[in-house]
Image (cartoon, rainbow, N blue to C red):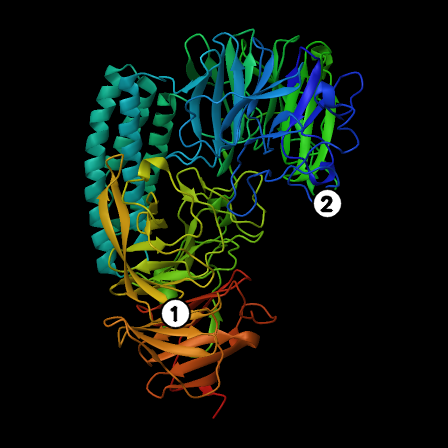
Amino acid sequence: GYMPVTDEFLLWGTPGRSERERYDVQTLVAQGLRWRDSFPPDKEETWSDGQFPNWGVNDWEGPVVKDARDRTVGTFQRANRVSFVEADGVLRPTRAFSFHQMAWDSKRERMVFFVGGKTFAYDPRERTWTDLAPESSPVGCDALVWASLVYDAHNDEMLLFGGGMALNALGGAPTWLYDCEANTWRRPELGTPALNALRRRLENLAEDLREARCALEYEAGQKPDARRAASAAASEAVAGIAEELAKLKNELEREKQAAPAEQVGKAVRELSAPVARSVADNIAAQAAKMGSAESALAVAIRPLLAEPPLRSASQMVYDAKNKLVVLFGGDAQNAALNDTWVYDVKTRQWSERHPATSPPPTREVAAAWLERHGLVMIAGVRDGPRIGRRQTGSTAWTYDAAADVWTPLKGHFDDRRWKSLAYSPKDDLVLLRTTVHVFGGTATYAYRLDPETAADTREGATEIAPRLHFDWEEQTADLPPPDREAHAKVLDNLPVNVWVEMPGTGVPANCRWGSWTMDTDRSVALYWGGGHVAWKGTDVAHYDVALNRWSLSWPPEFPPLFHDYNRSLYGYAYGVRPWSEHTRKWYAYDPVSGKVVYARQATPRGPVETLTPTETGSGNWIYDPRRKTLHLPTFDRPFGTGDSTRLVSTPKGVYAHRNRTVWRCRVEKTEGPDGRDRQVTRWEQVSDQTPGGGSEWDATVYDSKRHRLILLIGKTMTFLDLESGRATPAEPRGEWSHHREAVYLPGPDVVLTPAGGNRHFVYRVAENRWHEVEIPFRREEEGRAPEVNPDTAIAYAPAHDVLVRYDSNRRVYLLRYDDNRVKTLDN
């Protein structure tokens, strides 16, 4: 930020790895263009040369403040938190990533921050800090990151918007206002009650339509009777939705909302058009109609929005000339944006602009108000030349709000992760601060604008359209439509006792260190998770055995700035979707409810709207694979989740094995805070007799013939009767080794598990004996067969009597196991 009273640029936050010897506050003046420590005036001598009191920095040789430390987002499940510490007579805040959550209060001549759950200020003359300590703060935003704060000089207010990791139903900060004089936060009244109510109804109907389409598509691989039933159910749902949309169209017309009404009418016509009898069972044709109507409804909703859609890493600025706050682009967590919004400080209302040309979608946007020129400047647009082999040059644009015109500028800078702009009107100088990654590698650029010569000839975007971070349709564009009948022949003719690679499945996520679970009703394998610098997407990947095709639950969200970071991050994404983590065996399909239960590790408490006095345990997430819907989490699980925790599917529900205890989960339907259906979990302990210890490589298998669990822990094997809760040592014969991915096959009555070096072992229950068996691989390309590793996932599809395997080479393999014909290696 820029502080005009001292003509200084200011840096505050967590220092990078190469800057840990620097003081908390760094300033730069235009004449020197060098950052320097900015100690309190009476400490400049005694605190120099690294003698200021510090904390939380490795290898620090100066004085250390006891019990003080920085708490920053990025470490395991750690949130941004700020506390005030007094050291050597000086009160200072502990450091955290500040992002764009700071703004200059010109009336009081101070820099105001909303970081780590606190509202505080810095006085550049006295070089002192003040904890402003308002009575309340934006709801659920104590851990807010990637947001933006801007000062509205017209109303003497700070406006906060965007960001992520907020524990509320949105996952970020909608528009909040901070009254600088009264020291209070509040939500403004945006839009009109009538239009807001219509928009919410329209959003609910659009969601109903999406869920109905997903439920239809989920049955595409099933038998003809099931497909016809799904087609009929979809037709019935569509008829009801179309009827409600027709009523809504009339109400929009009465409210003089012609454009939204026209789009709703388009959706109604699309839904009402008959499907030819010859394709009455054609799920693809029905789904295409529904998808087209969804697109029309998305267009209809947009003009009714009372504030911008949430986004991260976009810097708002106050256009003093036009009395507007300007916001461009940013990271929607599943896409880069290029929309332009303005907040009119006279009416305290948002509206979207529609310039003829806009900068292309931009993920991390830095912005500043160039007072001398009456223009907004943004930096970080990735449309410059390539620099080196990997990085792309970023460029800058200016925006004239009065003319609603964007103009590209000449020049570029190295593309880096974080970018922030500030402007000195005294020196007519723009300063750009960039960071290579979240912990360091910084650079500072200076820029001086000459509007007469700065304009470039680059073309911008003529459409306002997000650019998905991971475009599934683009990934699978070259694949032909799935052919159920052709693949049925492949399934019928699978050779026995060979892992056969399935080509043409699509490209699934690069999931790591996890398993998958099988919807045993429809033979759809569900993969949730990733991490380990591989996959940070929030999606659930579906593999339909009958179609030999992958699909995604939704366009995946990725944590801004942390999309290749090897940690399990705090909080969740927009839509209250948990960030990706190593899920191991922490989720399982429940055939009773048709949902997936996910006992997530270290789930933070929230969002606040979901909490009730009875919810006092660990967090559970419920996913409906048919409708591709994630329900709000509940917090009633009486046990935590560790590496060795394992959930397993049974016809009587999901069971969880945790240390010495086994628990049963029931999924129940209730009504959520928004009046829509919500799924909750209820847990009851079944046993406390199981062996303790174990690791993430151990296995828990359900024996469906005897309604018991088989526990493979180290070199021990235990039976747990699920009716009595009694545990019995198995004491099997034979040499054996096992992996996390052990599967029970009811036909031959065996447990099959892979082991290191492409070995396979089976446990023949009637014999109470293990055998090593030979199961080779048949691959599409020559090369080494995939070895079992932390990324291997295996499940059994009973409808097709095949084992389904996913490996770190991102390939799917099917196995038709015949215990009578398999080659036993230890006889």
Disc 1 element? strand
- The amino acid type found where label 2 is placed reads Asp
Q: Nearer the viewer, residue 36 or 790?
A: 36
Please state the horizontal and vertical placement of residue 665, each as a whole percent of the image: 28, 58
Q: Which residue is mark 2?
A: 59
Vertical arrangement, residue 92 with respect to residue 615, above or below: above
Please state the horizontal and vertical placement of residue 274, each as a whole percent of the image: 23, 40
Vertical arrangement, residue 664 with respect to residue 406, above or below: below
Q: Is residue 613 left or right of residue 26?
A: left
Q: Residue at x 32, y 53 (%)?
A: 218
Q: Residue at x 41, y 24 (%)?
A: 136
- Nearest to the eye among marks 1 and 2: give it: 2
Q: Nearer the viewer, residue 124 or 284?
A: 124
Query: Could you tell me if the residues under marks 1 and 2 are in contact, i.e. CB atoms within 8 Å?
Result: no
Count residues near mark 1 (Cα–Cα under 10 Å), then give few for <14, some for 14-19, many for 20+. Answer: many
Residue 143 visible in the displayed image: yes
Image quadrant where residue 65 sits? top right
Tell me, for residue 700, which label it has, or none: 1
> How many numbered callouts?
2
State the quadrant of the N terminus: top right
Q: Is residue 646 left or right of residue 760?
A: left
